[in-house]
Amino acid sequence: MRKAFTLIELLVVIAIIAILAAILFPVFAQAKVAAKKTQAISNQKQISTSLILYIADYDDQYPRRSGCELNSSINSKLNDGVLRCSSGTGFGHSMTWQTWQKYVMPYIKNVQIFDHPLRIKDATQWSTNGQVLNSFALNLGLVGASVGSAPIIATPWTGGSQTGIPDTASAWILGEFPHTYAAPLAVQSGQPNNQTTYNMAVREYWRAIFLKNAGGCSTTEEVDPVAAPAGGLILGFADGHAKFYQVKKFLAETPTLAEYNPGASFPANLGSNCRNATNAWLYTGGSVVPNLDINYPLWALGQ
């Protein structure tokens, strides 16, 4: 009576298991990424909806704030009664665009919504400044900003309001980007503190963020998996919905520098490999007003 497998039979079983594992493991990995992407879309939609609730309470105006408010950090560990608005104590109580999550927190009431499940939140920025870096980001080009004690007031050409955007279902307000809190503003050279600002709607700039670097400011055509871990980015739109965009689609719906602002030079000193540095909130785009008549509705242009 046979009581055991032969060596050949065992080897065959092991080989079959190895083949099945090689086939199934990538499938499981893709399913995991897809599930996290779905969660990220849900998070982005909730943030987009909360921004609509915010402007409903503030006369149709997107948030443009600065200053410092004690115990305002979304990281509760930093709300210890010590004012945190300096390099010595950190910037946990700052109200500028780096901590834009504070503006919508009353409508969300859940800090975890701001975390992106496919990205690693910067632990140092969170523990020191209560800021969520390497996750969802605000489009300052349509929202605007206020910076400094004698503040620079940056108001978008749309007026910084939802009703100023021609097609709210096509224009993005929030996106997921690496290494920054917000998409920077573009402004004409030499403007005073009360500035009219524009979207950073320059394809070459975004290529440097989402495509692999080929030396200097040059890029390949290959998507950078660190910048776009799912092969694309999730955008939140001005009407409150959110959806996933492949990187190449996002770039195709973004004007080139020659189309948008022929008076500007590129690249500019915005960080390594011409990518947006963490503190690069403002891009000086030359002396010519960008061309607002070109048809790029993703950027609220041409409508």
Image (cartoon, helix red, strand yellow):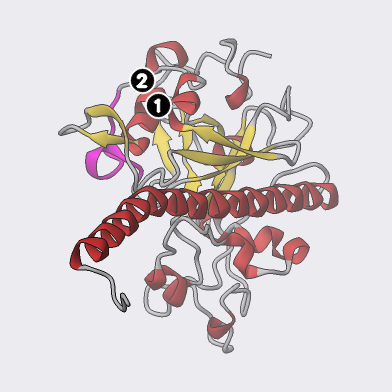
Q: Quadrant of residue 106?
A: bottom right
56 and 16: which is toward the camera? 16
Indicate the amino acid at tag 2.
Answer: Ala
150 and 28: which is toward the camera? 28
Secondary structure, magenta segment, majority class = loop
Q: Is residue 294 above or below residue 273?
A: above
Indicate the amino acid at tag 1.
Answer: Gly
Question: Which tag, 1 or 2, sits closer to the chain's start?
Answer: 2
Q: Which residue is mark 1?
A: 285
Q: Is residue 83 above or below residue 203?
A: below
- Report the disc number at residue 222: none
Residue 231 location (% of width, % of height): 43, 38
Q: Which span is picked out in magenta?
A: 266-276
Q: Residue at x 57, y 53 (%)?
A: 35
301 and 68: which is toward the camera? 301
Q: CA distance from mark 1 to mark 2?
A: 5 Å
SS state under label 2: loop
SS state under label 1: loop
Whether pointer 1 and pointer 2 mark residues with C-beta atoms closer than 8 Å, the reply is yes
